[in-house]
Amino acid sequence: MLIRHVLEDRVLHVTLLRDLDVASRAAAALQIEMLLVADRPRLVRIQLPTSDPSPASLSVLALARRLCEGLRTPLTVVGPVRPAAPPRPAAAHSPS
C-alpha cells in the first residue's frame, strides 16, 4: 500500500505512507488521480512522509497539483506528523 486516504466533508486527506521511488511513483499517482476524479473533493490535503521528500514523491505531488488546478480544487501539502513527546515525570521532592 502506497497511500492512505479518507474523505470527510468533501475534503480528501491523502497520506503517502512512505517516500516513493521510481518504481512506486506511477502507482501512487494513478491512485491519487482516481480518487480526485471519482470523489470530486472541494479540498485536497496531502501529507508527505518525510520533510525531505524524494524526487519521485515530489513528482507525484506535482501531478496532484496539476490535477487539482484542472479541477479548480485547492491543494494543501503538509509534512510528516511528529509524535508528541511523552510527558516528563514530575521531579521528586525529597523531604528536608
Image: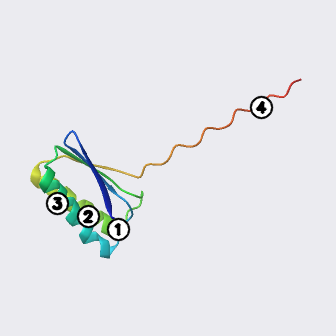
Kindly report the distance in space between the C-alpha atoms of the residues bearing marks 1 and 2: 9 Å
* Whether residue 55 is situated above or below residue 4 in the rendered picture: below
**Which mark lies nearer to you, 2 or 4?**
4
**Which mark lies nearer to you, 3 or 4?**
3
The secondary structure type at the circle numbered 3 is: helix
Question: At 11% from the left edge and 48% from the top edge, which residue is drawn?
Answer: 72
Neighbours of disc 1 within 10 Å: few (<14), some (14-19), many (20+): many
Kindly report the distance in space between the C-alpha atoms of the residues bearing marks 3 and 4: 56 Å
| Image mark for residue 60 | 2
**Which mark lies nearer to you, 2 or 3?**
3
Horizontal side of 1 relative to 12 (left or right) equals right
> The disc labelled 4 sits on which kind of residue?
Ala
| Residue lying at the far top of the rendered structure | 96
**Which mark lies nearer to you, 3 or 1?**
3
Kindly report the distance in space between the C-alpha atoms of the residues bearing marks 2 and 4: 51 Å
Query: Who comes first in sequence, dot 3 or dot 4?
Result: 3
Kindly report the distance in space between the C-alpha atoms of the residues bearing marks 3 and 1: 18 Å
| Image mark for residue 34 | 3
Neighbours of disc 3 within 10 Å: few (<14), some (14-19), many (20+): few
| Image mark for residue 20 | 1
Task: Residue under label 4, please give it.
Answer: 92
The secondary structure type at the circle numbered 1 is: loop
Query: Who comes first in sequence, dot 1 or dot 2?
Result: 1
| Residue lying at the far bottom of the rendered structure | 23
> The disc labelled 3 sits on which kind of residue?
Met
